[in-house]
Amino acid sequence: MDTLERMPFKARKAVFDKLLEVADVANLSKDERILYDEALKRYRDYKNTIDYAEEKGVEKGIKSLYLYGSAKFAVHPKTLLITKIQKIKPSSTL
Protein backbone atom coordinates (compact mmCIF):
# COMPACT_ATOMS: atom_id res chain seq x y z
CA MET A 1 0.00 0.00 0.00
CA ASP A 2 2.97 2.30 0.63
CA THR A 3 3.88 2.10 -3.06
CA LEU A 4 0.34 3.00 -4.04
CA GLU A 5 0.44 6.09 -1.81
CA ARG A 6 3.64 7.31 -3.48
CA MET A 7 2.13 7.00 -6.96
CA PRO A 8 0.67 10.05 -8.72
CA PHE A 9 -3.12 10.21 -8.73
CA LYS A 10 -3.43 9.31 -12.42
CA ALA A 11 -1.33 6.18 -11.92
CA ARG A 12 -3.39 5.19 -8.87
CA LYS A 13 -6.58 5.65 -10.88
CA ALA A 14 -5.16 3.40 -13.61
CA VAL A 15 -4.37 0.70 -11.04
CA PHE A 16 -7.90 0.79 -9.64
CA ASP A 17 -9.43 0.87 -13.13
CA LYS A 18 -7.47 -2.29 -13.97
CA LEU A 19 -8.58 -3.93 -10.70
CA LEU A 20 -12.18 -3.07 -11.48
CA GLU A 21 -11.85 -4.53 -14.98
CA VAL A 22 -10.36 -7.76 -13.61
CA ALA A 23 -13.11 -8.02 -11.00
CA ASP A 24 -15.77 -7.46 -13.65
CA VAL A 25 -14.31 -10.17 -15.87
CA ALA A 26 -14.06 -12.57 -12.93
CA ASN A 27 -17.79 -12.16 -12.27
CA LEU A 28 -18.88 -13.02 -15.80
CA SER A 29 -20.88 -16.16 -16.43
CA LYS A 30 -19.29 -18.88 -18.56
CA ASP A 31 -21.17 -17.77 -21.71
CA GLU A 32 -20.41 -14.10 -21.07
CA ARG A 33 -16.74 -14.94 -20.50
CA ILE A 34 -16.59 -16.77 -23.84
CA LEU A 35 -18.13 -13.76 -25.60
CA TYR A 36 -15.76 -11.40 -23.77
CA ASP A 37 -12.69 -13.47 -24.68
CA GLU A 38 -13.78 -13.63 -28.33
CA ALA A 39 -14.35 -9.86 -28.46
CA LEU A 40 -10.99 -9.22 -26.79
CA LYS A 41 -9.26 -11.53 -29.29
CA ARG A 42 -10.92 -9.74 -32.21
CA TYR A 43 -9.85 -6.37 -30.80
CA ARG A 44 -6.24 -7.50 -30.29
CA ASP A 45 -6.10 -9.08 -33.75
CA TYR A 46 -7.44 -5.87 -35.30
CA LYS A 47 -4.98 -3.69 -33.36
CA ASN A 48 -2.04 -5.91 -34.29
CA THR A 49 -3.12 -5.88 -37.95
CA ILE A 50 -3.29 -2.08 -37.98
CA ASP A 51 0.07 -1.75 -36.18
CA TYR A 52 1.72 -4.16 -38.62
CA ALA A 53 0.25 -2.36 -41.64
CA GLU A 54 1.47 0.96 -40.29
CA GLU A 55 4.97 -0.43 -39.76
CA LYS A 56 5.04 -1.85 -43.29
CA GLY A 57 3.79 1.48 -44.67
CA VAL A 58 6.62 3.33 -42.94
CA GLU A 59 9.14 0.84 -44.31
CA LYS A 60 7.72 1.21 -47.82
CA GLY A 61 7.88 5.00 -47.53
CA ILE A 62 11.50 4.90 -46.39
CA LYS A 63 12.42 2.59 -49.27
CA SER A 64 10.81 5.04 -51.70
CA LEU A 65 12.72 7.93 -50.16
CA TYR A 66 16.00 6.06 -50.55
CA LEU A 67 15.20 5.15 -54.15
CA TYR A 68 14.53 8.81 -54.98
CA GLY A 69 17.53 10.04 -53.00
CA SER A 70 15.49 12.06 -50.53
CA ALA A 71 16.11 9.89 -47.49
CA LYS A 72 19.17 11.85 -46.38
CA PHE A 73 16.90 14.73 -45.53
CA ALA A 74 13.67 12.97 -44.62
CA VAL A 75 14.74 9.99 -42.48
CA HIS A 76 16.30 11.24 -39.29
CA PRO A 77 18.16 8.70 -37.14
CA LYS A 78 16.30 9.91 -34.04
CA THR A 79 12.92 8.98 -35.49
CA LEU A 80 13.85 5.39 -36.29
CA LEU A 81 16.51 3.06 -34.98
CA ILE A 82 19.56 3.04 -37.24
CA THR A 83 19.46 -0.76 -37.39
CA LYS A 84 15.87 -0.55 -38.61
CA ILE A 85 16.81 2.03 -41.25
CA GLN A 86 19.71 -0.13 -42.44
CA LYS A 87 17.39 -3.13 -42.64
CA ILE A 88 14.87 -1.15 -44.70
CA LYS A 89 17.38 0.45 -47.10
CA PRO A 90 17.32 -1.07 -50.57
CA SER A 91 20.54 -3.02 -51.17
CA SER A 92 21.43 -0.80 -54.15
CA THR A 93 21.97 2.20 -51.86
CA LEU A 94 24.18 0.47 -49.29
Image (cartoon, rainbow, N blue to C red):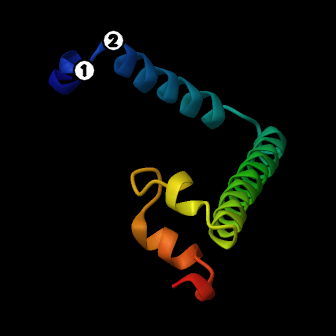
Neighbour tally class for label 1: few under 14, some 14-19, many 20 plus, Cα within 10 Å: few
Contact flag, marks 1 and 2 (Cβ < 8 Å): yes
Side of 53 where 16 appears, left or right: left
The disc label shown at residue 39, or none: none
Identify the residue shown where x is 69% and y is 67%: 68
Between residues 56 and 7, which one lies in front from this camera angle?
A: 56
Side of 15 where 21 appears, left or right: right
Identify the residue shown where x is 56% and y is 29%: 23
Residue 15 in the image, given as x and y percentages of width and height = 41, 26
Identify the residue shown where x is 42% and y is 16%: 13
**Above or below: residue 2 compared with residue 61:** above
Q: Secondary structure at mark 1?
A: loop
Count the marks.
Answer: 2
Which residue, as the protein is rendered here, is positioned at the far front? Answer: 69
**Above or below: residue 57 compared with residue 17:** below
**Above or below: residue 56 compared with residue 4:** below
Between residues 71 and 35, which one lies in front from this camera angle?
A: 71
Identify the residue shown where x is 46% and y is 53%: 76
Between residues 90 and 29, which one lies in front from this camera angle?
A: 90
**Above or below: residue 66 compared with residue 17:** below
Neighbour tally class for label 2: few under 14, some 14-19, many 20 plus, Cα within 10 Å: few
- Please, what is the three-letter code of the amino acid marked with disc 1? Met
- Circle 1 residue: 7
Side of 80 where 44 appears, left or right: right
Real-space Cα distance between discs 1 and 2?
Answer: 6 Å
Quadrant that contains the N terminus: top left
Q: Secondary structure at mark 2?
A: helix
The disc label shown at residue 9, or none: 2
- Please, what is the three-letter code of the amino acid marked with disc 2? Phe
Residue 51 in the image, given as x and y percentages of width and height = 68, 53
